[in-house]
Image (cartoon, coloured by chain):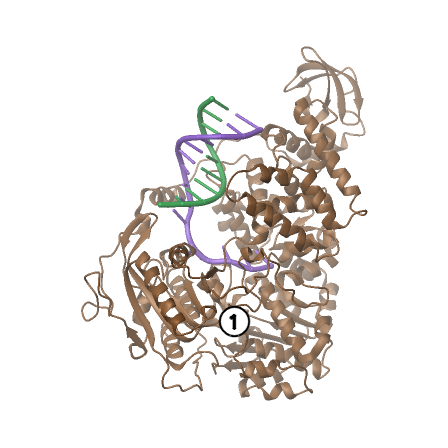
Chain colours: A brown, B purple, C green
Amino acid sequence: MIRSTDGSAMPAVPGFEESASAPLRGPGMPAPKRGGIAERALGGARPAAAYLDKLNDEQRRAVETVDGPVLVLAGAGTGKTRVLTTRIAHILATGRARPGEILAVTFTNKAAREMKERVASLVGPSAEGMAWLGTFHAIGTRILRRHAELVGLRPDFTILDADDQIRLAKQIIQAEGLDEKRWPARQMHNIIDGWKNRGLTPANVPLGEARAFANGRGADLYKAYQERLRVLNATDFGDLLLEPIQIFRTHPDVLASYQERFRYMLVDEYQDTNVAQYLWLRLLAQGNRNLCVVGDDDQSIYGWRGAEVDNILRFENDFPGAAVVRLENNYRSTAPILAAASHLIGHNEGRLGKTLFTEDVDADAEKLTVASSWDSEEEARAIGEEIESLQRKSHSLDQMAILVRASFQMREFEDRFVTLGLPYRVIGGPRFYERKEIRDALAYFRVIVQPADDLAFERIVNTPKRGIGEVAVKTLYDTARSRQIPLVQAATELVQTEELKPKTRTSLKDLIASFARWRSELDRLTHTELAEIVLDESGYTEMWRMDRSADAPGRLENLKELVRAMDEFDSLPSFLEHISLVMDTENEAGQEAVTIMTLHAAKGLEFDTVFLPGWEEGLFPHQRAVDESGQAGLEEERRLAYVGLTRARQRIFVWFAVNRRVHGMWQSTIPSRFLDELPEEHVDVREQSGYGGGYGGYGQSRFDRVEPFSSTYATPGWERAQRRKSQGTPQPRAREPLTIEGELVAKSVSDAEPAFPVGTRVFHMKFGNGSVAAVEGNKLTVDFDKAGRKRVLDSFVQRP
DNA sequence: GGATCTTTACTTTTT
DNA sequence: GTAAAGATCC
């Protein structure tokens, strides 16, 4: 995110709203209830201990139980963030620790930012000294940079994002001569990511799992991947946690220094921690055990990316004697909403168990509305009408949200709202820094700052098109790989030879010269000036200006936006450092609008009115969750429903469509089992007429039983995929000889004594046989029998 | 090397 | 149905 030097949030820059991340305190994140408890708690600086008055008994206990392990089970809307921030304020106010001695960890940058702001509102500017308040990854990076050399990295290592990781995985797969179709890079990335989430290094991946990928070579590929990262002086996101764990384990003195430094530790959203994060925390907490974790097992919805609800369930075992505080007093929702949410989540087993209650006894509180439509288009139309009707009763659009299970559902709402002229905003979708043009531009900057950044160089070497095609890139790679040098350096050497076609050679030479020039101007120009020059001289902006496609102007606008965003930082490296971790931009509040987002994205937010469409079997609970994770999957889906319900302050509309288009085919649906898990006494079933049938009164459900649709997955493609998965796959043909480490070392050592002295007969793939006329380091001048005199690299010739 | 055709996936997604 | 990535053709 963009922040000014004093740490306050900057107004969002226009254009950034396309990034569609949740606003800081825009419509999605409303300010606390006017005159409400939260607002009073936030009300400016006040004498010490006054902050405690604003808490209820349990919250106060959670704040004041400062020493020793504490588990705070905070239900939805029970003032979880307030407890965390007040606790920090309390520790500071009572002089137990200085700001720099508190470790406070969150999952998202947004949460970290909010926490810092709220602590600042309680304790004033000293909150700025909280250097260790941040995301797991930000703090991990900080630790790793300090001790990088202990794990074979330089302190200026680059952090690769998912895109880079997949490309790296692809290179490994190719280098190993595996069939890219059978073993997709994306899958390899997922597997490695999963291992890293579980704290597994290549050496301790369970044997069975290591075998599952690439005919038993899964762990080898992981190892190769890690080795590549070292060569690139890079880490991926998983390493930001794994490497510090490694350091802590192998260097007790380093661990001890951190255990001493962090006098108090706090963790937000503990139910979302994965094994690696758990191990990391446990190592740090073993010192003084002043660890306070806050979470809600009922809101654990990230199991699919490695979160272990078990971490929260077994906290008391890990930290015997832990104080457990339950926050159950809900300040957000009406009684019927809480009753519905509690009733639904009560169908899950294996909970720590909390019962939310509210002191708000509004006799007029609305029941939940459950309604159905003939199909998904009708559903969007009906919800649109509902929104307009609320709008006429002067409800703010900012206070309405449509929470969907899967992003494809958003489209029908968007289509409908465009027709109606109803303002909406979509949260989620590709982020600003994930856009192609932004990533391309960043790649240029990365190569300038870090010439060894091969992934960045490869990305832009032929973007815009400059005649450096597949063949040329492959030649670059071969050279780089065989000599263990970065691509840029390989390119520098290759252009001095005649390995490449003259045209290719010239443009590669130009590119390298450009990079050298830009790099030399790094100190002379401001980084924004340089950025503009780079984008201009490289022909990158020109490329989009020439592009006649509809989105080209928008992309140019994004590039301008990028340069504007860079202005907030004081140097190119600091900008790059920032964005690798904080791929996050502010959303301006702008016009009043309905929010459309996924249930996952909605966690932590609240709205007066919440629409929950698509409650159909197969979609919600999602078929795949049930198929792949069985009961556990179903329970996670139910928690997702719980999260959805508890986002609402006043009213909820649950919707389902009788027919929905699945992969382009209309299919009839079965109403979600979750509908029947809502308490009847708090639900108004809206009888729908107009599509025949109707429902209610007959069948097993209160909702119409419709023909079950044939499983989506009974399609030929799916079956093929299943067959492929289950079959033992034969070793695909080796595409190119494996480059073996020993050989490589031998080659680079050979520099001292030429492997091909003058007069040696050599063979070159392209130029045929010839004899060496001169040797200059690794460059040979060879008189070829047919092709004449050429300068080539020694790694391209062999003895005949 | 670039344009065009074909194939494939298609839940959720932060860092 | 659709969009993006990959393969194939020119």
Q: Is residue A176 above or below residue A61?
A: above
List x then y, in percent, for residue A207: 52, 50
Q: Residue at x 40, y 78 (%)?
A: A338
List x then y, in percent, for residue A224: 61, 43
Relative side of A614 to A218, left or right: left
Relative side of A11 to A642, left or right: right
Q: Nearer the viewer, residue A405 or A265?
A: A405
Q: Nearer the viewer, residue A588 or A419?
A: A419
Relative side of A216 to A764, left or right: left
Q: Residue at x 81, y 29 (%)?
A: A752
Q: Does residue A301 appear in the picture of this structure? A: yes
Q: Does residue A159 appear in the picture of this structure? A: no
Q: Quadrant of the C terminus of chain A?
A: top right
**To which quarter of the image does residue A598 belong?**
bottom left
Q: Nearer the viewer, residue A342 or A420?
A: A420
Q: Residue at x 44, y 67 (%)?
A: A401
Residue at label 1? A312
Tell me if mark 1 has few (under 14), some (14-19) or many (20+) residues whose alpha carbon lies within 10 angstroms of its own. Answer: many
List x then y, in percent, for residue A8: 67, 68
User: Could you say whether the residue bearing mark 1 is in a helix, strand or loop?
Assistant: helix
Relative side of A734 to A474, left or right: left
**To which quarter of the image does residue A772 belong?**
top right
The single residue placed furthest to the top in the displayed view is A785
At label 1, the amino acid type is: Ile
- Subunit that carries the residue with mark 1: A
List x then y, in percent, for residue A159: 65, 52
